[in-house]
Amino acid sequence: MKAYLLTRLILAVNAGYLAIYVSAPAFLEAAPVKKRKAEITSVREISKDKSLVTNMKKDIKVVRFPAVDSKNKPVKAKYHFYIQGGLHGNEILTSKFVLWLVKRLRKHQGPLSRLDKKLVAIDLVPVANPDGIADNTRTNKKKVNLNRNFSHLWGLSKEYPGTHSFSEPETRSTRYLFENNKYTASVDVHGYINWIVAPTKPTLIQVENNKDLANRYNSWLTALKKQTKKFDPSYELKTAGGLGDGGAFEDWAFWNQGSLAFCLEMATAFRYQHNFNKATKKSVRKDVFIKYEKFIYDMFRHAIKITDDSKLIANN
Ligand SMILES: [Zn+2]
């Protein structure tokens, strides 16, 4: 009986609140925040190419935030960015991080949301290796390390890089996106070690043949160096070629596609750091996603500046 009365009471109170809420003057109601326009699609849908699915016939999903005008209508972006996670299927936190970025962008939260929406479009691929995530493996279904399957310096790797570069539908999907969108900058998120990985230093041949790209490389490497130092003193800046692997995403994205690319390694597989505060004798929980998000934002800002500067030089 008591429980029944209590339930009635709660219902009555709730109804009261509801009545107040419904009859509240408009200015008392919090203005509903309109979520940022996003399109959830897949490489197969965008390309209309049925072969651009994984070996297990899974779609590679893409979340697209177009640049929009003041009336929220999609417009052509001046700068286009690309963020990818989960190329190694067992690095699950990287996919969770990219999904979290999607949520942040949808809700206009975080530094990436401060980039001018009239000028900036962002494509995100949270799970670049869906079969690997399903099986919790580093490789794809055919045991190929996808981050060794891109074309620049392909075949150096001790890990299986595939029968030839772009032998895999997952890397061909990435190639499709890059060949059909001019990505100003791009990041491939990995784990777990405290490194930022830049594209390989230019060879003499590249400097001879493409001085602009070599200059862009130097500006990009300088920016990565500066930002890595600021980001975390325990972090080291590596280059893909310096690691001796070959076939890495950031190398191909930069040297073949001209995108200011890098690989962001998350230091650990844990989202939260717990630090004991001696003064308050309390454990403080820190969300590391925040600092990775900020690093990406800082690098995108550098990319915008480098792109604008190179256009100025070209126009003079
Ligand atoms: Zn990885």
Image: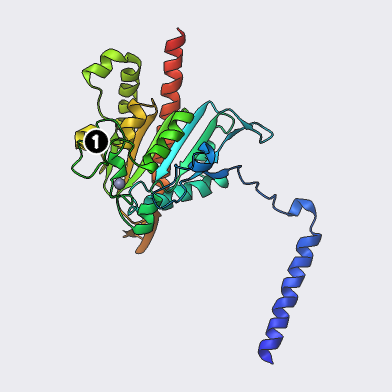
Is residue 70 visible in the rendered image? The answer is: yes
- Give the image quarter of residue 215: top left
Where residue 116 appears, as percent x and y from the top left, is 55, 32
Residue 199's image quarter?
Answer: top left
Quick one: SS at disc 1?
A: strand
Where 25 sits versus 185, above or below? below
Please give the name of the residue rendered at 35% of the width and 21% of the height, measured from the top-left corner: 216
- The residue nearer to you, when weighing 94 against 236, is 94
The answer to whether the residue bearing label 1 lies less than 8 angstroms from the nearest atom of ligand 1 is no
Quadrant of the rendered image containing residue 164: top left
Q: Nearer the viewer, residue 196 or 1?
A: 196
Q: Farthest residue in the bottom direction? A: 1
The one of 114 and 88 positioned closer to us in this rendering: 88
Q: Which residue is mark 1?
A: 238
Q: Quadrant of the C terminus?
A: top left
**Amino acid type of the residue tagged 1 in the rendering:** Lys
Q: Position of residue 110 (x, y in %)?
A: 50, 44
On the image, the x and y values in percent for residue 49 come to 49, 39
Mark 1 surroundings within 10 Å by alpha-carbon count, few (fewer than 14), some (14 through 19), many (20 or more): some
> What residue is rendered at 55% in x and 39% in y?
65
Q: How many marks?
A: 1
Which colour scheme appears in the figure? rainbow
Quadrant where the N terminus is found in the figure = bottom right
Q: Does residue 219 lie above or below 225 as drawn?
A: above
Residue 98, percent from left and from top: 44, 47
Compared to 82, does 88 lie above or below? below
Q: Residue at x 76, y 71 (%)?
A: 15
Q: Is residue 83 left or right of residue 1?
A: left
Residue 63 visible, this angle? no
Q: Is residue 29 left or right of residue 80?
A: right
| Frontmost residue, 218 versus 7 | 218
